[in-house]
Image (cartoon, coloured by chain):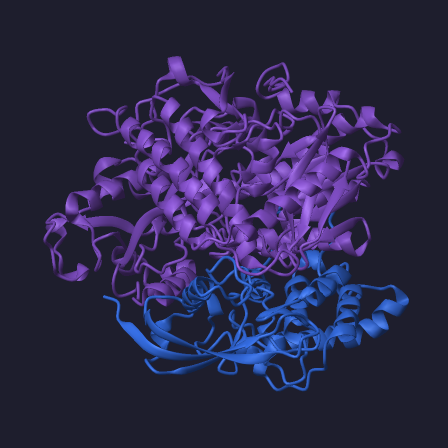
């Protein structure tokens, strides 16, 4: 397949593009929709909402998740909130402002038209979720409450205590469950995608593996939606759930879908620092805490007094000092680097000196403990459970950790990858967040894609296929993919080496974190690119998976995922190496101002890098989609 | 600074599949940091088992932040272990002492058949939600979100019961294997809200009767509330029972208003 990256952006002014598109899109008549089968892989916000809506419209929908229930998807762990340009607070918010903030927050590396559409439909999301019974926080008069998030000077974030992701996901899950109950959706739990099948340059379906009995099965469809989340677990330690992985997206990539901007990864500034070598994951503390918490480190690297005894004059409130206009609500990439520099300069706090303080004592004095508890009670409890310290008495200790990945499968305006019939939605695609995502925008994007974009765009693709036969699962391409998948999983068992998949995951994660984490250099990336293939070879020779392929085998599942992380990791480093500029989450130490801020190179790099698989992840081919900014002017991002 | 626990005696349920009888297997955990979570302790055990060419212990887990509801485990006979309002993934080894014997079992309930070792099938919960645990609001056409004001106290009460993570601890802790707390939490969440009124009694009837197909009956032991990692109050069961009784009159006449 030759790669063409046609973004299919509709003509017209930025305000009209989405309406123009909807007016021009081809439709499938209600009675004909049941003749089309759509597969949705993943049941998070994007997947569940897309599946439920398409089933309501009348399509036959099959949904696949590796979880035991669609309600477990990792969207559930999002804490802080969801943005929408409702301007309920009357503080000057608008669709344009949300659009601009998102483009600027992404350091001018996202596609204008997609982001504007996101801001437009953001208001519909809140209406939809309230009508489904999502118990958002309310004021005493019964109206919806809002709070502020990083990178914004308005309060546009809707929330449900510290569990917004949970409530939104359960809302979407319940809509999905309704369609399952009505017989419009067939749900496949504990089933993992192991391959994507393309026939005659169209996506024809997928191959899955039943995690309970190991059975490998093909499924054909008119279209396939990948709503499979991000790849932040490539770092091993991250705030992602343990099972989050890149396998589905990677299998699509290996079958011809280009993978865009893999080096754009987000390191979230407020996570609980690592405390122990056995640690399996890091826990996020919501960004909303930065509304009332103040970030500081002692000025003296040798400070030994407890936080409360360090006088004001000997504290460095790093974000308030460096970014006075946004203060503690500076965007994530900027806040993370400020924390990293403080720790690197020896001023870190805690027993391992690997964190910075997030201090609520001023907020408690100003608002009272009750108000602080009302706002953040469950987050404070969670912190105490994990860190064993009470944040009402001593400041939290926080440090950045891998949290979200802006990169992902390349998609056009219709959310279709470069393979016709294969779509990507939510965190799995690359399109809306550029080089850095603003807080409370992931939930917005997942639901925008699933509820309000895909159900429109998919009809435009399906309409011309009416009454035309599609390849069935007896097609040789499906059979070949099944055999290859069986051989792949049997292969892991047959290596019979000495090291567990977790061992290799830790090792690959360490290399990626050290050289392709918060700060990258040419030298470091080249080092990673020489170490990774050697480690990958060791993986292929020395992996040990006990048990067999015909029963529940979590070690085997892990082996397949780590294998794909290796390949992705190499591509990430390649991408980071070739992007000779700093932007958002991609910070190349060679490209910074005297004050240590990211320096973009708009002349050379105002484009999307979309990678084509060649069989060897170190030899992938780089394609470019130029980013044209018509509605806004490229500017140096400043939060000072 | 972290301390280390020594010489933990683990008694773990092993069962190769749904039809296997199953048995306890003894393991010694020579040393573990008190900063480790309970599941990280099992990770260490499993790495060791792989090292010895043995099968690791299968258990369900995912977010490890206490919100996805995937993890389970009866620990010394208590669902999610000894710490109040804490899911197993957030339980830390600092709650144990060197030399402790720890008995680890799967959820035990006839509605949750064992898949392997400590992993069970909780899909009966999904059946209950599919029968009515939703508000029928198709995408598109929703009115403005602020059109219907919801008193803060009502929104808060709905949120209290909407916090359920669907882990199944309530069922595992119940001597009858009843799912009343799970079902009632969802019914209370939706029935309290103005948006949920249209289907209130139809929902309640369908969900209660689906629940009864799979699960045991509630006899007010209150073990479910004690085990719930989200501290959902059994008051919701009273609300459910009240609406279920009403539904038997209301639904016959297709009248769903109060």
Residue A162 to residue A440: above or below: below
Percent across and percent down for residue A52 are 72, 46
Q: Is residue A336 left or right of residue A69?
A: left
The image position of residue A216, as x and y in percent, is: 70, 49
Q: Is residue A280 visible?
A: yes
Quadrant assignment, res B17: bottom right
The number of numbered badges drawn on the structure is 0
x and y, in percent, of residue A82 in the image: 51, 45
Point out residue B166 in the picture as x, y percentages from the top left corner.
60, 65
Q: Residue at x 21, y 39 (%)?
A: A321
Tell me which residue sits at (49%, 48%) in the image.
Answer: A81
The image quadrant of residue A410 is top right
For residue A288, side relative to residue B33 (left or right): right
Q: Is residue A272 left or right of residue A547?
A: left
Say whether residue A209 is left or right of residue A637.
Answer: right
Placement of A367 over or under A270, stated as above or below: below
Residue A405, visible in the rendered structure: no
Q: Does residue A161 sit above or below B242 in this rendering?
A: above
Colour for chain B in the figure:
blue
Quadrant where the image shows the N terminus of chain A: top right
Which is more toward the observer, A186 or B136?
A: A186
Q: Colour of chain A?
A: purple
In the picture, the quarter occupied by the C terminus of chain A is top left
């Amino acid at each position: 397949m030759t790669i063409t990256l046609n973004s299919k952006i509709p003509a017209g002014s930025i305000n009209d593009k989405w309406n123009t598109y909807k007016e021009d899109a081809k439709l499938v008549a209600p009675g004909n929709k049941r003749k089309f089968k759509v597969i949705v892989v993943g049941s998070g916000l994007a997947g569940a909402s897309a599946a439920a809506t398409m089933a309501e419209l009348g399509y036959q929908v099959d949904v696949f998740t590796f979880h035991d229930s669609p309600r477990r998807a990792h969207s559930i762990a999002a804490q802080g909130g969801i943005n929408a340009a409702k301007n309920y607070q009357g503080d000057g918010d608008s669709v344009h402002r949300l659009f601009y903030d998102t483009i600027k927050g992404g350091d001018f590396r996202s596609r204008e038209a997609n982001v504007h559409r996101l801001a437009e439909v953001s208001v519909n999301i809140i209406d939809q979720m309230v009508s489904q019974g999502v118990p958002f926080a309310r004021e005493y008069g019964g109206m919806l409450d809002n709070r502020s998030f990083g990178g914004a000077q308005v309060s546009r974030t809707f929330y449900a205590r510290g569990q917004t992701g949970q409530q939104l996901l359960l809302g979407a899950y319940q809509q999905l469950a309704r369609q399952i109950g009505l017989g419009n959706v067939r749900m496949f739990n504990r089933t993992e995608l192991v391959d994507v099948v393309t026939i005659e340059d169209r996506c024809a379906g997928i191959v899955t593996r039943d995690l309970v009995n190991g059975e490998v099965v093909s499924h054909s469809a008119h279209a396939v939606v990948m709503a499979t989340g991000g790849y932040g677990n490539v770092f091993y330690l991250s705030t992602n759930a343990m099972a989050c992985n890149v396998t589905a997206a990677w299998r699509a990539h290996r079958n011809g879908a280009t993978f865009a901007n893999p080096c754009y990864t987000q390191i979230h500034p407020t996570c609980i620092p690592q405390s122990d070598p056995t640690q399996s994951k890091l826990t996020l503390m919501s960004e909303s805490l930065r509304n009332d918490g103040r970030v500081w480190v002692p000025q003296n690297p040798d400070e030994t007094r407890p936080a409360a005894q360090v006088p004001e004059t000997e504290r460095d409130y790093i974000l308030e000092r460096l970014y006075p206009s946004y203060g503690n609500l500076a965007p994530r990439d900027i806040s993370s680097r400020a924390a990293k520099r403080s720790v690197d300069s020896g001023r870190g706090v805690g027993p391992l000196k690997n964190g910075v303080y997030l201090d609520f004592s001023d907020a408690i004095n100003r608002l009272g403990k009750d108000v602080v508890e009302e706002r953040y009670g469950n987050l404070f409890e969670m912190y105490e459970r994990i860190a064993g310290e009470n944040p009402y008495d001593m400041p939290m200790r926080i440090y950045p950790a891998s949290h979200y990945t802006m990169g992902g499968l390349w998609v056009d305006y219709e959310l279709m990858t470069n393979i016709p019939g294969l779509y990507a939605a939510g965190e799995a695609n690359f399109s809306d967040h550029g080089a850095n995502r603003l807080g409370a925008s992931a939930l917005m994007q997942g639901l925008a894609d699933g509820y309000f974009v895909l159900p429109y765009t998919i009809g435009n693709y399906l309409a011309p296929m009416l009454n035309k036969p599609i390849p069935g699962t007896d097609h040789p391409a499906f059979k070949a993919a099944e055999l290859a998948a069986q051989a792949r999983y049997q292969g892991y068992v047959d290596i019979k080496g000495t090291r567990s998949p977790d061992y290799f995951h830790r090792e690959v994660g360490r290399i990626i974190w050290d050289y392709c984490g918060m700060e990258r250099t040419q030298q470091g990336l080249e080092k990673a690119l020489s170490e990774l293939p050697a480690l990958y070879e060791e993986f292929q020779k020395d992996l040990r998976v006990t048990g067999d392929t015909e029963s529940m085998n979590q070690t085997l599942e892990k082996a397949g995922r780590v294998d794909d992380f290796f390949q992705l990791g190499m591509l990430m480093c390649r991408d980071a190496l070739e992007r000779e500029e700093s932007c958002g989450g991609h910070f190349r130490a060679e490209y910074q101002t005297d004050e240590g801020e990211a320096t973009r190179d708009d002349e050379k790099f105002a484009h999307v890098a979309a990678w084509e698989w060649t069989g060897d992840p170190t030899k992938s081919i780089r394609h470019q989609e130029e980013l044209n900014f018509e509605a806004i002017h490229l500017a140096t991002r400043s939060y000072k | 600074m972290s301390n280390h626990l020594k010489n933990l005696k683990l008694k773990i349920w092993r069962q190769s599949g749904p039809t296997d009888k199953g048995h306890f297997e003894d393991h010694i955990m020579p040393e573990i940091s008190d900063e480790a979570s309970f599941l990280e302790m099992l990770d260490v055990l499993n790495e060791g088992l792989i090292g010895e060419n043995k099968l690791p212990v299968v258990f369900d887990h995912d977010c490890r932040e206490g919100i996805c509801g995937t993890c389970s485990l009866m620990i010394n006979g208590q669902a999610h272990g000894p710490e109040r309002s804490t899911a197993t993934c957030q339980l830390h080894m600092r709650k144990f002492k060197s030399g402790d014997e720890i008995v680890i079992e799967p959820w035990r309930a006839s509605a949750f058949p064992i898949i392997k070792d400590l992993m069970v099938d909780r899909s009966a919960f999904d059946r209950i939600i599919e029968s009515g645990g939703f508000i029928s609001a198709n995408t598109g056409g929703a009115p403005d979100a602020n059109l219907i004001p919801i008193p803060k106290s009502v929104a808060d009460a709905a949120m209290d019961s909407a916090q359920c993570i669907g882990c199944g601890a309530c069922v595992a802790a119940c001597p009858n294997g009843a799912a009343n707390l799970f079902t009632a939490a969802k019914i209370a969440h939706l029935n309290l809200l103005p948006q949920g009124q249209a289907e209130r009694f139809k929902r309640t009837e369908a969900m209660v009767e689906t629940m009864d197909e799979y699960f045991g009956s509630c006899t007010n032991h209150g073990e479910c509330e004690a085990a719930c990692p989200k501290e959902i109050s059994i008051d919701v069961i009273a609300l459910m029972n009240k609406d279920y009784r009403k539904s038997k009159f209301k639904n016959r006449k297709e009248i769903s208003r109060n």
